[in-house]
């Protein structure tokens, strides 16, 4: 059943998307401003469930690309997402294509809403990552054999680069990343153009709904910080995702972060407080949080969702906003089954990020 | 008046193009093989003088891009130039476009002949550099205000990237270089699509003829090495270029060369022999030879053409083939007036390559 997202929903969606963004996906605030401006002009956006999509309807996932550390300083002009979407649509001759998120996280949950509102078209309630991931081929669309090209990259100069054909989706990531770096470190990219039938077999469903649900749970929770965390944990149990678990609470005592090869890489060390006093954990990230270590053991790992929450407010802290002294709580949400097939784990399990071990279930407490 | 280039002319053209390539432009041998295969299948290629071009006829300059050091090991598949040309033609809706060189040098004098032969179309006797230069915006087409985009980059994987719109020609160089590096260091690129009227106002004319003329002079010269050098020097006095001057003769005693940021950069030191015994000069290059130094003075500089010749054969030695112990002769050819306007010298005079002095006429001997 289709439903509507209105301006009043954007706050909750931005909050939920930031939590699903697992530290990445870009600052949702910027995405919210962009979506709100478009909805103020053109009204609410209709959201299509995947089941409603006609098999032959074009769908084009659209997103920001680049290191969130750059986005933080190089604010988009605002016209890039629609421009990247329309230019690819024209290139394909894909009349009336529907926008769809590539990831369920941060700015990139909201960018397709801006495009949908601007073009007065529905958006699709699904995405290709089920969270945020740092590389373009880390999408179920890739895992199910869909080509990422043609794709179109747009910059704030109204520059357009069309990746007309690339021989595989790793080349898409490699070339698009290179262009993005040379365009200043952040761009918007339309890619993996596909038909409704492809979305039905390959997408992670219901993730816009999930983001909204998590955000609403937090906004409507009682004002105690424990109430907020409980509300978030209960809300994630939806669309195949697990119920959230609180893994650790403490204070950030070290942040190291570099922007290298177009990615924000680093780690943060958290010293325990309250029931975790005397312990410490390390979160390692590449744009997004990849895993949590404690001494010799790994407490949680990709593709499960690891999010650093502000302990007081329950809001997600993106990797570029991690600061010494912050009181934070680590939330872990197990990913749905479609994200844990052997084929999927090959792409975004620990080995997909260069770690020398296989995925195993997390130990929450 | 249009004329024809036949397979029998390709040897002379490759020899002449290598000399005009001033050390760069890629190994002409590879271009010759590619052009010869296409002409063997489809016959000779008609060459249009610029004056014959209809004002509204599309012309698309086509060339190899990347460090010659890479081309030396990563041999083209052979289908890339036609593919890059056709894909851009389709993108533009430019029916029946004519290929044209972007530079008068090395492989890039011959690539447009391959395209012309394969498509059974005439080639244009002109180019945008009048020699070889290392960067894409170093073309009279840029100096006369023509946009380099849309452009199309093709790799040996049949990958295509269309630079649909970039806000200036420096961005074209920057983005195309980035894509070329990520495609393995060498690609083929169609760019600066324009009409016949633009070619008439902006191109350096007659450079295919000049290359053929220089090559024929060398092939037909008496067998003594002094005869060969004299024949080359006399042949360059054509289409506004100066009569060639022999600047120095000696033995290479040092070569330093790095492939950095997609360019082959370095220098070669030559110790004098015969009348230059006791002296030594240094040639500095970035893909192409940029200037000749002797102690504190600069003997020759861009945009004049500086070519290292094998002293015995009179053949050009490209920068990637410079070797310790080679006996070489430095040839300098003054560039035509269109290449020395104040606007042109800003782009490719010494300051265009980071040197802190202005262009001045060379001192030959």
Image: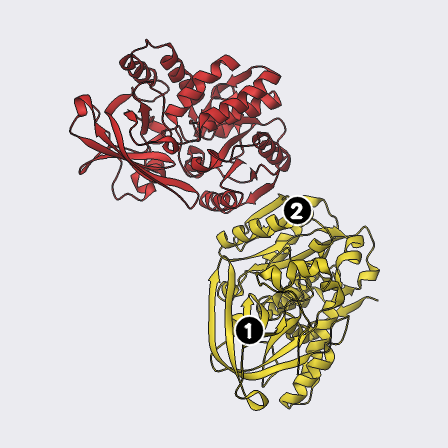
Chain colours: A yellow, B red
Q: Position of residue B311 (x, y in %)?
A: 29, 21
Horizontal arrangement in the rendering, residue A227 relative to residue B335 (left or right): right
The residue marked by circle 1 belongs to what chain? A
Marks 2, 1 in one chain:
yes
Residue A179's x, y, as percent? 53, 50
Label 2–label 1 contact, CB within 8 A: no
Q: At 36% across and 14% down in the image, what residue appears?
A: B218
Which image quadrant for residue B350? top left
Mark 2 or mark 1: whose residue is earlier in sequence: 2
SS state under label 1: strand
- Element marked by disc 2: loop
What number is the disc on residue A150? Answer: 2
Above or below: residue B306 compared with residue B148: above
Residue identifier under label 1: A283
Q: Position of residue B66 (x, y in %)?
A: 46, 38
Against A319, residue A353 (above or below) is above
Instruction: Check the picture and name the quadrant holding the N terminus of chain A.
Output: bottom right
């Amino acid at each position: 059943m289709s439903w509507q997202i209105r301006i009043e929903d954007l706050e909750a969606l931005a909050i939920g998307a930031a939590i699903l963004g697992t530290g990445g996906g870009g600052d949702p605030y910027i995405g919210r401003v962009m979506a709100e401006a478009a909805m103020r002009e053109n009204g609410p956006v209709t959201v299509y469930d995947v089941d409603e999509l006609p098999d032959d309807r074009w769908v084009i996932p659209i997103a920001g690309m680049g290191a969130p550390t750059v986005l933080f300083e190089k604010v988009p002009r605002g016209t890039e997402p629609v421009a990247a979407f329309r230019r690819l649509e024209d290139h394909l001759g894909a009349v009336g294509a529907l926008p769809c998120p590539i990831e369920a996280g941060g700015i990139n949950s909201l960018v397709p809403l801006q495009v949908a509102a601007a073009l007065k078209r529905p958006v699709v309630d699904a995405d290709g990552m089920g969270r945020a991931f740092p590389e373009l081929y880390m999408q179920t669309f890739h895992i199910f054999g869909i080509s990422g090209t043609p794709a179109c990259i747009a910059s704030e100069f109204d520059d357009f680069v069309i990746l007309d054909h690339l021989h595989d989706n790793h080349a898409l990531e490699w070339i698009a990343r290179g262009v993005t770096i040379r365009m200043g470190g952040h761009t918007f990219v339309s890619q993996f153009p596909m038909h409704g039938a492809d979305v039905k077999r390959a997408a992670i469903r219901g993730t816009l709904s999930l983001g909204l649900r998590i955000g609403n749970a937090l906004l409507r929770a009682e004002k105690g910080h424990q109430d907020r965390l409980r509300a978030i944990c209960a809300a994630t149990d939806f669309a195949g995702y697990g119920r959230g678990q609180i893994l650790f609470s403490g204070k950030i005592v070290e942040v190291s972060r570099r922007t290298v090869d177009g990615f924000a890489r680093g780690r943060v060390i958290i010293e325990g407080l309250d029931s975790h006093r005397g312990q410490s954990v390390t979160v390692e990230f590449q744009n997004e949080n990849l895993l949590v270590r404690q001494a010799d053991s790994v407490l949680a790992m990709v593709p499960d969702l690891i999010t650093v929450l502000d302990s007081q407010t329950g809001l997600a802290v993106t990797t570029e906003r991690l600061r010494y002294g912050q009181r934070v709580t680590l939330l872990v949400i197990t990913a749905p089954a479609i994200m844990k097939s052997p084929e999927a784990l090959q792409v975004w399990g620990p080995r997909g990020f260069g770690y020398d071990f296989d995925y195993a279930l997390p130990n929450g407490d």
